[in-house]
Amino acid sequence: MKFNRTLLLLVILSIGCLQPTGSAWAQDLVAPDRIGRSDAPKSFTFRVLTAHSNNNAQPKFAAGMAELYEKYARNHPDWRVRIQLMSLQIPQEHARLLEQARNGTAPDCTSMDSFAVPLFIHQGLLKPIEQYFTKEEVEELFAFVRPIVSDTEGHIYAWWWTTDLRLLFRNTAHVPDPPDTWQRTKEAALAAKRTTPGLDGLLFNGGRNETTMVDFLPNFWAQGGKLVDEKGTPVFGKEPNRAYLLNAIAYYQDLIKSGAAPARVASITDYSDLTASAIAGSTAMMISGDWVIGQMQAAMTPDAFAKWEISMLPGPTAEQRSTASGGWTFVSFSKDPEKVKACMDLVREVYMGPAVEVLQLLPTRQSEFDSMPMFRSEIYQRIKQYLKKSQARPGFPIYTAISNRLQIAISSTLSGSHTAEAAVDEAMEQVAKVVPKP
Amino acid sequence: MKMALQRRHSGKDRKSPGAARSALRFNQGDHPFWWLCPVTIVLAVFYVYPVLEVLRTSFTDATLLDASYRYTLGSYRSILLDPALLQILEATFVFVAGSVIGQTTLGLLISLALQAGLKRRLFGVRAVRVTVLATWVVPGVASAITWQLLLSEADFGFFNAMLKFASLPPVPWLSAPWMAIWSATVANIWYGTALSVILLYAGLQTISPTLYEAAAVDGATAIQTFWHITLPGLRPTLLITVIIVSVLSLNTFEIVMPLTGGGPGRSTEVLALAAYNMVFYDFNLAQGSVLAVLMLLINLAVATTFWLLFRGSR
């Protein structure tokens, strides 16, 4: 008995001694602030959104990213990647990056919100990176991607590796068929409210936040509206764009006045509010992003989740429809070609495909929907088709100012403090004041 | 002891080493420059220089989009002639005035209650004190998110759920412009009251208990005691409290930003938030600096006004 105990102890100790060897090797290659061996001869700085790294709050995603990083580290033993985490204070982070890039202190390799890329291209702070990607890879990108990350000569300055998509979510128990027009959406919402008292017909972001703009813009784009012209000059206040903008705001107003959407949408700025209502079963429809599918699936019973369906956002007519996409890119600020290549190797080997699957995000290349098992499902194939019609926010630095002023216009109109005409005209006047110096 | 001091000042035995050390101490006390030097440098580098830099930037047309700039009064003209400024100042006034009145009044009531509770050795007073102070520990953003959940107009919103429970109609806490600014103010009052309690409770401890005993002997009522002893005794602390609360409320946007983002429309866009939007959304450093200078001037005006008012009533 005593012998057995000693043997058991020896076995446990042996396992204990052997086990750390493998994990120590892994730990040695990947740490919260590092990829690669700490004594590697070459290094570069890598600023990345926390959620897109091995520091992700969800252990499953963090472990998946660590595994991808480890693979990169094994393939590039000479490199030590110094991780810097980017906060969710996106405007501050990009303002800081802008200042750092001007001073030559920006990270060698960094995440960048897709809609901020044009600002850095126009400032001449980025260098072309197309030589690190094949022609086929570039051509596979969805149509909305290239205009944002390219200059007028077609050079690519950032690799847009993940995207998202605005969709109409509906509970089929309340709204069996997907409404394709604004009018049918209102009718469907009102019908759902009639049959189920206390239910909200349709929820969307209508408060002061960028989320409101991304949800709202497809209604403007669907009519052919343009916020800026080819040179980046704001034109949303000129006809016919002004009329398109007023039509889109009138659609939102009509939803509230008719009761199809509750008045509180004027204060909603966060998708989690909408998701909470969907999970609680208190709304028939909502305008939200693709990432919500996973959240809903995790929080709902299979039966309840099965009732939810997605469809393309409705438009003024069934033929005039659009949707919006955002997403994240990687750029390099390094002047050292070796570091730029190392950065792009990291993007290619970790983020261009594998990371979207690990983090359950949408890829930006059409072929990735067919090559990766996760995206072969019917729902993702439908999303792939919608992405072909999707649009991105304009690739000009003035966009952030336009967005801020239009958020005020939409929010003040929905809350009833301004008429749509006055709010849009005021927004145009305000934006005219902040147009960059010639 | 007295003799030793006299000897030190007489300078008779300066030649001995001990006397030399004493002389050095004497000289240091006589020349405060070296003592003040470190704090002066810290203040100059971290406080005065940024203020001067903001002031300088406000007289330019600098933006984050362009490294070049020129000196101009255009940024002041643009901000001061902007019709939106009036809305921003209106929202700021309601927010700051409401916060100062609410935080000071509540702070005074709570500190008086705490003092009375301690005097009577009531059970749980210490727990109440810790609970009140705990709100001060909560970060502003976290308290804003908590208030967002409380004020949410969805079914899970606490206040509307309570109203529904009482068969009362829901209130548009954050979606109606006239209501949203008050909701933000109430959230800020909740967040900032703890600081008022700390200051005023400390102030109450400085009032001599003999005054209260004399008042009791004279048969003064509670209101008379409060009016003629507590309030005059608290006046210096009240002045400090009111100034600190005003400055903090004027400069804060950590409550408003997550709670309403400045909306609906501009109904909750206070000065600090407007300055943030100007810099980080419009990339306009100069106009953001003009708003910062405006905040500085208002802060100085408010502090001076309160100081004059309290000094006059002394």
Image (tube, rainbow, N blue to C red):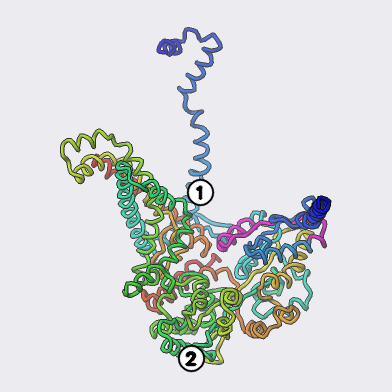
Amino acid type of the residue tagged 2 in the rendering: Arg
Taking the magenta stretch, the answer to whether it contains residue A99 is: yes
**What subunit carries mark 2?**
A
Q: From this view, report whether residue A30 is shown above or below residue B119.
A: below
Name the one closer to the observer, A315 or B86: A315
Q: In the structure shown, which secondary structural element does the residue marked by tag 1 occupy?
A: helix
Taking the magenta stretch, the answer to whether it contains residue B165 is: no
- Using residue B9 as the reference point, say whether residue A352 is left or right of it: right
Q: Residues within 10 Å of mark 1 (few under 14, many from 20)?
A: few
Name the one closer to the observer, A279 or B240: A279
Q: Are marks 1 and 2 on the same chain?
A: no
Question: CA–CA distance between discs 1 and 2?
Answer: 56 Å
Bounds of the magenta segment? A73-101
- Using residue A43 as the reference point, say whether residue B251 is left or right of it: left
Quarter residue B208 falls in: top left
Q: Position of residue B303 (x, y in %)?
A: 35, 46
Q: Which residue is mark 2?
A: A184
Amino acid type of the residue tagged 1 in the rendering: Glu
Numbered badge on residue A249: none
Kindly give the residue lying farthest to the left in the view shown.
B219
Q: Position of residue A321 (x, y in %)?
A: 56, 87
Frontmost of labels 1 and 2 is: 2
Q: Which residue is mark 1?
A: B53
Q: Residues within 10 Å of mark 2 (few under 14, many from 20)?
A: some
Could one spot residue A325 in this view of the protein?
Answer: no
